[in-house]
Amino acid sequence: MNMATNLTPVIALVAREVKRFQKIWLDTVMSPIMSMVLFLAVFGLVTAGRQIEGIAYLAFVYTGLLTMTMVNASFSNPAFALVISKNVGTFLDLQITPVPAWGVGLAYAAAATIRALLTALIAALATIWFVPVTGIAHPFLAALAALLIGLAFGMFGVIFGMYAKNFEALTFVMTFVIQPMIFLAGTFYPISELPGIWHTVSLFNPMHHAVNLMRYSIAGFADSDPMTSLAVMAVLAVAVFFPMQWITKKNLKG
């Protein structure tokens, strides 16, 4: 099967997944945007006038929340879609499809990336009127960062979605793995303020590099070297592809 023949069903699967989350847009797109707006409204009232390293605290938090929204959207989209398909019996469609395992995994990750980008864009437009960010410091880097975040965590979502048998398992991962990593990544504070060992631990948190890269791209502020964060996210996006492909192939074989 040549590359062109492989890509046609992959693109069709991406389109199917995009159509799926569009049908429930209030839950998949508007709900996380509303959460972000409420976070910003509260922080705007409580921290009015406060600055961190020369930038408004609200702008600092804004970039962290934008990253958090993208991570949650990209991870949850394939994870919950796959568990739903197992529960309603449509997972069989993936097992008999002519799409290779890598194609199935990448299709779900690509749809997750589209949802993450769409959610982030609408969230940015909805909040720009009260966030003190006048522009994007590094537009190309911001686009690259968003793409890497969507793909990397989208593929993580595929991995957990392939393994999980029910929604409780996914909720456990979201609550006790994803959310703690996000909140300990410097989303709401600069990790430079953390003492000793905790600062070092934060540097090994991939979520920190996602937040740091997006924050530098938009606001021009970085907690740690932004090029290191870019390298970490690029390596993560490539590295996670291989276990995703293996796990997808294993599960599709039944």
Image (spheres, helix red, strand yellow):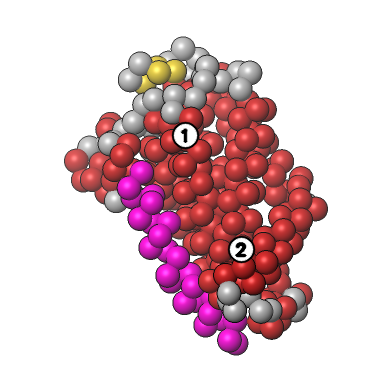
Q: Which mark is residue 107?
A: 2
Residue at 57 percent of width and 27 percent of height:
40
Q: Which mark is residue 140?
A: 1
In the shown orientation, is residue 227 left or right of residue 95? left
Spatial distance from mark 2 to mark 1, Cα to Cα?
A: 24 Å
Residue 29 in sight here: yes
Q: Name the residue at the top extreme.
A: 49
In this orientation, which residue lies closer to the viewer: 153 or 147?
Answer: 147
Residue at 35 percent of width and 55 percent of height:
235
Q: Secondary structure at mark 1?
A: helix
Indicate whether 173 appears above or below 118. below
Q: Quadrant of the C terminus?
A: bottom right
Q: Position of residue 229 (x, y in %)?
A: 33, 43
Q: Position of residue 240 (x, y in %)?
A: 42, 63
Indicate whether 18 appears above or below 125. below
Please tell me whether residue 229 belongs to the stretch shown in magenta: no
Q: Would you identify the image quadrant in which residue 237 lies?
A: bottom left
User: Which amino acid type is shown beneath numbered disc 1?
Assistant: Phe
Crowding at mark 1 (Cα within 10 Å: few <14, some 14-19, many 20+)? few
Please tell me whether residue 231 belongs to the stretch shown in magenta: yes
Residue 163 in sight here: no
Magenta region: which residues? Answer: 230-254
Q: Quadrant of the N terminus?
A: bottom right
In this orientation, which residue lies closer to the viewer: 166 or 114?
Answer: 114
Q: Earlier in the sequence, mark 2 or mark 1?
A: 2
Residue at 47 percent of width and 49 percent of height:
148
